[in-house]
Every structure is written in C-alpha cells, then in structure tokens.
C-alpha cells in the first residue's frame, strides 16, 4: 500500500526542472533591472548572465539534435 510519499526516479534532479531554470533567470532579470541605468543596459546584462535556456537545452536535447540522429 502506498504511503503517500512522492519518490523521484534515481536519475531525477531538481535542477532538471524547467521551472527552476526560469526562476533563476527571473532572479537575474530582477537584479540587473534594479542595478542598470537603462532598459538597454539591463537587457544586455540579462543576455550575458542568464543561462536558463542553455541549461534546459543541455539537459533536454531535442531528438533531432542528438549525435546519433535520435530515435528513428
């Protein structure tokens, strides 16, 4: 009988979750907006410092991007 505890698979990590990548980028956006003198400066700093999209893409490659050509 299940005890109600949620168990993640052994290969699962919290950092794999897309939502957490987005949250980290949101924190970067808020920080650079507060520290920057203009919207343009904030956008440039965000592009340099945010890495959520890249982190997500590394963790979840698209099948057509796989080195072996992905599933057939």
Image (cartoon, rainbow, N blue to C red):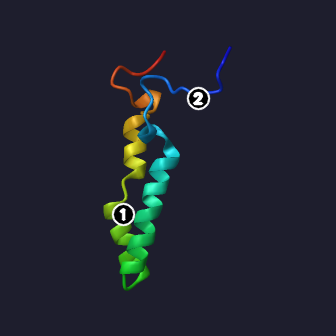
Q: Is 3 or 40 nearer to us in this picture?
A: 3
Q: Is 40 or 64 nearer to us in this picture?
A: 40
Residue placed at 39% from the left, 22% from the top? Answer: 69
For label 2, the crowd category at 10 Å Cα-Cα, with few meaning under 14, some 14 to 19 and many 20 or more, is few
Judge left or right: residue 42 versus residue 4.
left
Q: In which quarter of the image is the N terminus?
A: top right
Q: Residue 4 carries which label?
A: none
Name the image quarter holding residue 40. bottom left
Rendered view: 3 above or below 25: above
Q: Is 36 or 9 nearer to us in this picture?
A: 9
Rendered view: 17 above or below 5: below
Q: Say whether disc 2 or disc 1 marks the residue closer to the N-terminus.
A: 2
Give the image location of residue 32, x and y in percent.
38, 73
Q: Identify residue for label 1.
A: 47
Rendered view: 40 above or below 22: below
Residue placed at 38% from the left, 45% from the top? Answer: 55
Q: Residue 6 carries which label?
A: 2
Give the image location of residue 21, x and y in percent.
45, 49
| Tag nearer the camera, 2 or 1 | 2
Rendered view: 9 above or below 15: above
- Callout 1: helix, strand or loop? helix
């Amino acid at each position: 009988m299940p005890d109600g505890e949620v168990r993640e698979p052994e290969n699962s990590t919290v950092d794999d979750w897309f939502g957490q990548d987005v949250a980290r980028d949101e924190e970067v956006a808020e920080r650079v907006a507060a520290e920057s003198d203009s919207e343009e400066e904030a956008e440039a700093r965000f592009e340099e410092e945010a890495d959520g999209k890249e982190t997500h893409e590394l963790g979840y490659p698209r099948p057509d991007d796989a080195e072996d050509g992905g599933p057939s």
